[in-house]
Image (spheres, grey):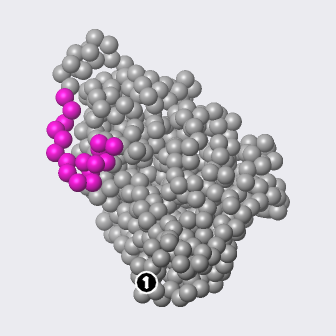
Amino acid sequence: MAASLKPTSWKLTGNPEAPREDPHWIKRTAARAHLRAIGFQDEDFKKPVFTVVSPYSNALPCNNHFRELTDVVVAEVERLGGKAFVCGTPVVSDGETMGASGMKYSLISRDLIADCAECMHQAYAADSIIALGGCDKTVPGVLMPLARLNTPGVSLYGGTILPGKCDGHEHLDACAVMEAIGSYGAGIIDIEELHKIECGSLPGSGACGGMYTANTMSSAVEALGMALPGTASSPAVTLENVITERKKEQCRQAVAAAMDNLKSGVKARDIMTKKAFENAITVLYALGGSTNGVLHLLALAYEAGVELAVEEFNRIGERTPLLSNLQPHGRYHMKDLDDIGGLPVVMRELLEAGLIHGDCLTVNGKTMAENVRNAPKLSDLTQDVINPISKPFAPAGRHIVIIKGSLAPDSAVLKISGKPIAQFTGKAVVFDGEQKAFDAVMDGTIKPGDVLVIRYEGPKGSPGMPEMLSPGSALVGAGLGNSVALVTDGRFSGASHGIMLGHVTPEAMCGGPIALVENGDEIHIDVGKKTVDLVVPESVLAERRARWQAPPDTLRGLLAKYRRNVAGAHKGATTY
């Protein structure tokens, strides 16, 4: 392997083309001795080094198969003439920590993963990154260092989970479990039915199966051009819970793409351009993706040096109809999209309508238009997973809306997912924290017409901006999804649906207006005007503001560091 394919790793090993008396070659003798101890031979010092970012853990189904995927990637790197250094990272399951104190660490883990990958990649002066993503924060987390460092590389999704089932229930998933809790609390199902759903919802490995955050971000990354075409939608495992041969082949193809980019000199920022981000946002709207996609795309753009303001989501959303019939707003799962051809089918429909940029470079060296040219055409398919633009699931402007107003002067993110909601006005029922709010839904305190306000759950406040899926799903399960609005400075799971207004900034911990809301205050949401207002006289708010004090700060360790450094949600909650 030519030394030209070692643009940085020669700093670790020494330049193999230099004479043995070269001062730098001599200086790196100790490093080579350590590398020989792990099996390096003379020829290996001529090979490029790939950082394989692998957020493996046996603690969660999204990533518990990553050890095997990593082995496939490492073997292919070796076969193609490289050396692979594996970088393990933390991984936090949203589904397992939801509604518990561990959820504070979920969003934090995104930036910690990025920092771990940067640390490993830079410490060993590696030449390229191959990044495996699964559970939702890991998908942006493993891609952020590629953009940050502007290194060659590729991202690969570990795959979606298959739908679950049990006696009397089909097409189950993580959302079904959460909503079943609310149905039990409302007396709609009994404890035996709840247990059946618990046992049958998640049949094996893979990330949550609807258009939730993991599948939103796998789609966005493919639309960005940083993942190979067709990899965003493929299942992780078979019905027997064995990794599919197709997923293993995608691992090998990803390594080949990374090697080709190293040879050609194509780096992450050559692909992650402003137009590429516009493509990713368009796909988010067309698929009915998670509000977390707003947060993560803002962070990725920041890492890539691309100017992207939260308000630009409205510009794209106002022209992009909702096409997918995918959970949580629709019927189907990611596997069903994969069965009809995956994301390339959607992107061909968007391209032919002039809604995405076809000239964007992608990680396989082709343009986006070239990648989708041979994808199945929607009009040739008999299916109802994806609607054509001529007959969308919902018109443009009816999915995610960025709004501002006296309650959210910087911004907030409203998710309506096709629901015909023009306005909502209700009286606030306020809780400082998620648990008491969840209890209020379960015990029947929350009534139709209420605005459930959950605050001090923002990036700094909680800290970590946990997801409000537990109370949100409890509302839906109790039959209140269309009659109660949930407003929070926290965020929502991709499985959340209903009238959901999150990412309220400034957050309560920073003294934002949401900190001043009291029980019985009127809150007015106007989707058309893109406003959310606290209908309270300014004189009253001024009096409350004068009395307000931030909660005491007693944090230590990682939570304390995160609170000090994290930016607002409207800036992607980045940490530097």
10 and 291: which is toward the camera: 10
Task: Answer whether residue 389 is visible to the viewer in this image.
Answer: no
Q: Is residue 104 left or right of residue 320?
A: left
Q: In what quadrant of the picture does the N terminus appear?
A: bottom right
**Vertical position of residue 537 compared to residue 17: above or below:** above
Q: Residue at x 50, y 30 (%)?
A: 403
Q: In what quadrant of the picture does the C terminus appear?
A: top left
Q: Residue at x 63, y 84 (%)?
A: 79
Q: Residue at x 42, y 62 (%)?
A: 119
Residue 286 magenta-highlighted? no
**Vertical position of residue 212 compared to residue 539: above or below:** below
246 and 562: which is toward the camera: 562
245 and 297: which is toward the camera: 297
Q: Is residue 91 left or right of residue 313?
A: left
Disc 1 marks which amino acid? Ala
Residue 552 magenta-highlighted? yes
Where residue 219 appears, as percent x and y from the top left, is 61, 57
**Disc 1 residue crowd, few under 14, some 14–19, many 20+, Cα 10 Å:** few
Where residue 561 appears, as percent x and y from the top left, is 28, 48
Q: Is residue 235 left or right of residue 491?
A: right
150 and 533: which is toward the camera: 150
Circle 1 SS class: helix
Among all residues in the image, which is located at the extreme front? Answer: 21
Task: Answer whether residue 11 is visible to the viewer in this image.
Answer: yes
Q: Quadrant of residue 174?
A: bottom left
**Vertical position of residue 296 compared to residue 501: above or below:** below
Query: Label 1, on which residue?
Result: 33
Q: Quadrant of residue 529?
A: top right
What stretch of residues is rendered in magenta?
549-565
**Vertical position of residue 330 compared to residue 404: above or below:** below
Q: Residue at x 57, y 73 (%)?
A: 15
Where residue 33 appears, as percent x and y from the top left, is 43, 83
